[in-house]
Amino acid sequence: MADNFLFNNTYSMLGKSMDISTKRHSMISSNLANMDTIGYKSKDIDFQKALKVEMEKTGGLSVTDKKHFDVGVNNPLEGEFRENDDPYNIDPVNIDTEMNNLIENNIKFKSNVEMMLRKVGILRHAIAEGGR
């Protein structure tokens, strides 16, 4: 029972979530770096879709009840081009959108790190209590 509690898929899912956040950070940074490049189109990763794909690869989620959410999606890890919604803005990259995406991604990454630290804390506590 303790084995399921301590060594479930949480570690791998948190790791994959951090990997996706890192890749998204790289794309957002690239968008900001090419802000003044003529003809450049910004790209972004849909975090939720990418995480679902990674969860499916490892069998982390399965629908066992009709009330469960559907987990089937295509592979979005390459990112999708994002069109500029403002018809009066000729800049290929909207700095406000990119900065908001960067902040949102940073918060998700920090949350995942905090969850990983708590999970490791539970493991440390179990090890310390087992040695007594």
Image (cartoon, rainbow, N blue to C red):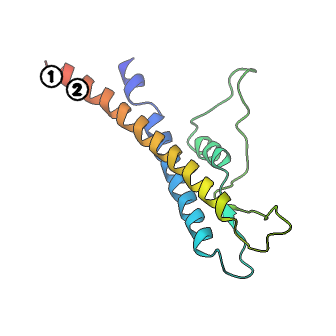
- Viewer-side residue, 77 vs 104: 104
> Left or right of 52: which side holds 9?
left
| Crowdedness near tag 1: few (<14), some (14–19) or many (≥20) residues, C-alpha within 10 Å | few
Amino acid type, residue under disc 1 in the picture = Gly
Q: Position of residue 112 (x, y in %)?
A: 47, 41
> Left or right of 15: which side holds 27?
right
* Dot 2 and dot 1 residues touching (CB under 8 Å): yes
> Left or right of 12: which side holds 60?
right
Amino acid type, residue under disc 2 in the picture = Ile
Q: Quadrant of the N terminus?
A: top left
Q: In which quarter of the image is residue 55?
A: top right
Q: Which mark is residue 131?
A: 1
Q: Position of residue 69 (x, y in %)?
A: 72, 29
- Viewer-side residue, 115 vs 1: 115
- Viewer-side residue, 9 vs 103: 103
> Residue at horizontal 57%, vertical 74%?
33
Which residue is the extreme one toward the bottom?
Answer: 38
Q: How many labels does the image show?
A: 2
Residue at the disc numbered 2: 127
> Residue at horizontal 50%, vertical 40%?
13
